[in-house]
Image: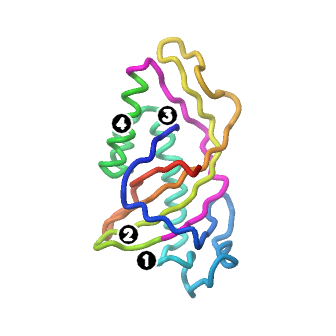
């Protein structure tokens, strides 16, 4: 998925990172900063658990797959209204241009949590996600590849910010290019 910077609530801090997903250990942050006991990320004000990290990985796949299928209903369930607005705008522009962005075979390669914090009754977490996917822009009428490759995975790194309200599930709040 080729997305512009979306959303707010993305406060970034490069002082700490923690790997998760695809078998990487959450202890990879130990060399970056003094790790606090019981916390997976040194800059973690909210106490992320492995379940949270697993959910971030699942959201990566769910968002990318729904985007590639133009599944607005699923995207609405797993993103904030602001993030959904940007994704819907991009999907709509693709349709107007006669294009469809096909995204499949999403696999997390590496993730680094940079920070997790609370603002009022909301928790936020920001992660750099490096993932591989089959990502191709197709002509909506002919199915011809206009950009990308339908057979060869490419790697992408983006900064994703997740949010949850007290007692609720995590949702995607923002995506930024890592470059």
Task: Decide which of tag 3 and tag 1 comes sooner along the chain.
Answer: 1
Task: Decide which of tag 4 and tag 1 comes sooner along the chain.
Answer: 1
**Residue at figure coordinates x 61%, y 69% from the top left:** 18
- Camera-side residue of 93 and 163: 93
Q: Position of residue 141 (x, y in %)?
A: 48, 12
Looking at the rendered image, the disc whose residue lies closer to the viewer, 4 or 3, is 4
Q: Is residue 139 left or right of residue 150?
A: left
User: What residue does disc 1 label?
Assistant: 46
Q: Could you classify mark 4 by the number of other residues whose Cα lies within 10 Å: few (under 14), some (14-19), or many (20 or more)?
A: some
User: What residue does disc 2 label?
Assistant: 123
Q: Position of residue 29 (x, y in %)?
A: 64, 74
**Residue at figure coordinates x 67%, y 79% from the top left:** 30
Q: Is residue 44 above or below residue 60?
A: below
- Camera-side residue of 30 and 71: 30
Q: Which mark is residue 68?
A: 3
The residues bearing labels 3 and 2 have C-alpha atoms spaced at a distance of 28 Å
Task: Decide which of tag 4 and tag 3 comes sooner along the chain.
Answer: 3
- In the rendered structure, does residue 53 fall within the stretch colored magenta? no
**Residue at figure coordinates x 28%, y 73% from the top left:** 120
Element under label 4? helix
Q: Are marks 1 and 2 in contact (CB under 8 Å)?
A: yes
Q: Are marks 4 and 1 in contact (CB under 8 Å)?
A: no
The residues bearing labels 4 and 3 have C-alpha atoms spaced at a distance of 12 Å
User: What residue does disc 4 label?
Assistant: 88
Task: Decide which of tag 1 and tag 2 comes sooner along the chain.
Answer: 1
Q: Which mark is residue 139?
A: none
The residues bearing labels 3 and 1 have C-alpha atoms spaced at a distance of 32 Å
Bounds of the magenta segment: 96-115
Looking at the rendered image, the disc whose residue lies closer to the viewer, 3 or 2, is 2
Magenta segment, prevailing SS (helix, strand or loop): strand
């Amino acid at each position: 998925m080729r997305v512009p910077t979306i959303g707010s609530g993305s406060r970034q801090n490069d002082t700490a990172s923690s790997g998760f997903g695809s078998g990487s250990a959450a202890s990879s942050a130990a060399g970056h900063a003094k790790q606090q006991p019981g916390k997976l990320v040194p800059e973690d004000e909210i106490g992320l658990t492995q379940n949270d990290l697993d959910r971030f990985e699942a959201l990566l796949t769910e968002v990318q797959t729904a985007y590639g299928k133009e599944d607005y209903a699923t995207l609405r369930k797993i993103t904030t209204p602001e993030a959904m607005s940007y994704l819907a705008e991009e999907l709509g522009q693709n349709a107007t241009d006669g294009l469809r962005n096909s995204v499949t075979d999403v696999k997390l390669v590496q993730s680094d949590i940079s920070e997790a914090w609370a603002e009022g009754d909301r928790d936020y977490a920001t992660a750099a996600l490096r993932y591989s996917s089959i990502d191709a822009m197709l002509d909506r009428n002919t199915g011809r590849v206009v950009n990308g490759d339908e057979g060869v995975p490419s790697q992408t790194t983006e900064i994703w910010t997740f949010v949850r309200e007290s007692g609720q599930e995590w949702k995607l709040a923002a995506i930024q290019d890592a470059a």
